[in-house]
Amino acid sequence: MGKIVSKARQLRLDLQAKEGKTITVGAAADRIGIDRKVLTRIELSQLGRIDAESLMKICVFYTEVLGRKIDVGDILEYDPDAIQSHAYVGTPQLSRAMT
């Protein structure tokens, strides 16, 4: 079974290259206008539920600073070959002994 994976970290690295300086997750989150913990979870693909407003803010911010249109598909993608860990799904899996 595949998994939704994040490409948000690459956008931050693209911004670092454009600006020629290190940009921390916290600094990026401040500039985007979202909580650092939210951006960290998105960048690490620790995705349970993502607020649509946070995705919109990420799209708007990176579209403006990178000078190219960024949409949700530039932030998240489905990887059919990725192994999905129950830690990121939101519903714990029951062991066979419990079922």
Image (cartoon, rainbow, N blue to C red):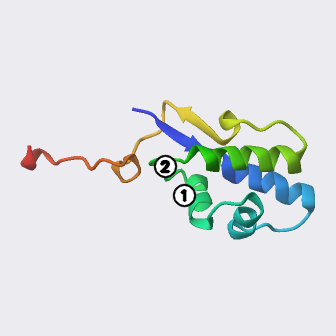
**Residue plotted at (87% across, 51% down):** 65
Against 17, residue 21 (above or below) is below
Q: Residue furthest front?
A: 53
Q: Quadrant of residue 67?
A: top right
> Where's residue 7, x and y in %?
66, 45
> Where's residue 94, x and y in %?
18, 47
Residue at numbered disc 2: 47
Q: Amino acid at mark 1?
A: Arg
Task: Report helix, strand or loop for mark 1.
Answer: helix
Task: Report helix, strand or loop for mark 2.
Answer: loop
**Residue plotted at (87% across, 57% down):** 17
> Where's residue 29, x and y in %?
70, 63
25 sits left or right of 1 in the view:
right
Q: CA distance from mark 1 to mark 2?
A: 7 Å
> Where's residue 39, x and y in %?
62, 58
Say which of 82 and 3 sits in front.
Answer: 3
Q: Are marks 1 and 2 in contact (CB under 8 Å)?
A: yes
Q: Amino acid at mark 2?
A: Leu
Say which of 33 and 25 sits in front.
Answer: 33
Rate crowding at label 2 as few (under 14), some (14 to 19) or many (20 or more) other CA atoms within 10 Å.
some
Say which of 72 and 96 sits in front.
Answer: 72
**Residue plotted at (66% across, 42% down):** 75
Residue at numbered disc 1: 41
